[in-house]
Amino acid sequence: MLQKIKNEIVEFKLLLKSVPTVLTVIFVLSVFSMNLLANKSINIPTPYLALDCGIIVSWFAFLAMDIITKHFGPKAATQLSLLAIAINLCFCLITYIASVIPGVWSASFVEGSEQVINGALDSTFAGTWYVLLGSTLAFAVSSVVNNFSNYGIGKLFKKNPDGFGAYVMRSYVSTALGQFVDNLIFAFAVSYVFFGWTPVQCITCAVTGMLIELLCEAVFSGLGYAIVGKWKKEGLGLDYICRQKLYEGI
């Protein structure tokens, strides 16, 4: 058991060395920012639809997971997702500490409204336990759904598993499933319980968010495929991939 844990640690360190730093950093930032932006709802002129601003960046997290899953496998993508969640929790703690430190935000200097605005900014950056818990749970579950469904769909393409058609199919379907699960869990766990959303709004939010984020995936799928092709051509992370195959007995 101890040896297995040591092997996992060595393997994870090798993964962090293998995945380009820029992608890892942007991935972590997207997870942190989408949880912060989820505090703001988007005004939509219909009672049947509801969205939050987290949708602006959440699509990138799923695009990154699709790229990593294709090249390194679902385990690697899930491990990086858990790392992003851990770092997000650390940053949430930092912003909470900043919110309770006595002081005034620069944006609150509005005559007659300083205290109200400053309190609102403190509350926003402090966050609330249910938003943090809901978003963490939603992303953790949806990342597993996305990564392993992506991998499973890819296995269905026997003739040309590395072709653009295979990449598009596995990315679109897994993103649709993952985003729907992410949106649905957050909507019911947070928006329904604490924000007063109706079940219809929760479901339509999950579907609408999925469609919008799927559109973003479609727009940037060519870029994702190009990145995967470049990585394969360069032999990126070959040590990690070979180690994975060795331990899987392939």
Image: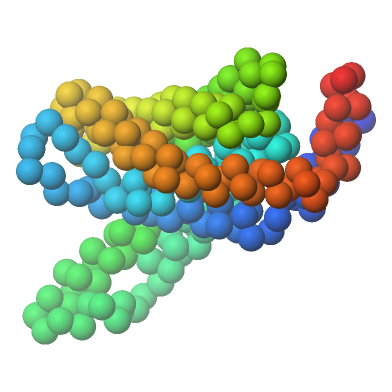
| Rendering coords of residue 117 (x, y %) | 20, 70
Question: Which coloring applies here?
Answer: rainbow
Q: Is residue 9 shown left or right of residue 156?
A: right
- Looking at the image, how many numbered discs can be counted on the residues? 0
Q: Which residue is drawn at 32% across and 34% down?
A: 211
Q: Residue shown at 29%/81% (left/top)?
A: 106
The foreground one among 157 and 212 is 157
Vertical arrangement, residue 228 with respect to residue 153, above or below: below
Q: In this view, does 155 lie to the left or right of 107?
A: right
| Position of residue 33 measured from the top left corner of the image (x, y, whole percent) | 43, 55
Residue at x 55%, y 49% (from the top left corner): 223
Q: Can residue 1 be seen in this view?
A: no
| Image spot of residue 206 (x, y percent) | 30, 30
Depth check, front residue: 125 or 19: 19
Where 157 falls versus 132 (above or below)?
above
Q: In which quarter of the image is residue 179?
A: top left
Question: Quarter of the image containing the C terminus?
Answer: top right
Q: Can residue 122 be seen in this view?
A: yes
Q: Is residue 183 left or right of residue 61?
A: left
Which residue is painted at 14% across and 49% down in the image? Answer: 43
Placement of 7 over or under 20, stated as above or below = above
Q: For this view, does 85 lie left or right of residue 197?
A: right
Task: Work out which quarter of the rendered image holds the N terminus and state it.
Answer: top right
Give percent across and percent down for residue 27.
56, 51
Residue 152, image quadrant: top right
Image quadrant in which you'd find residue 2: top right
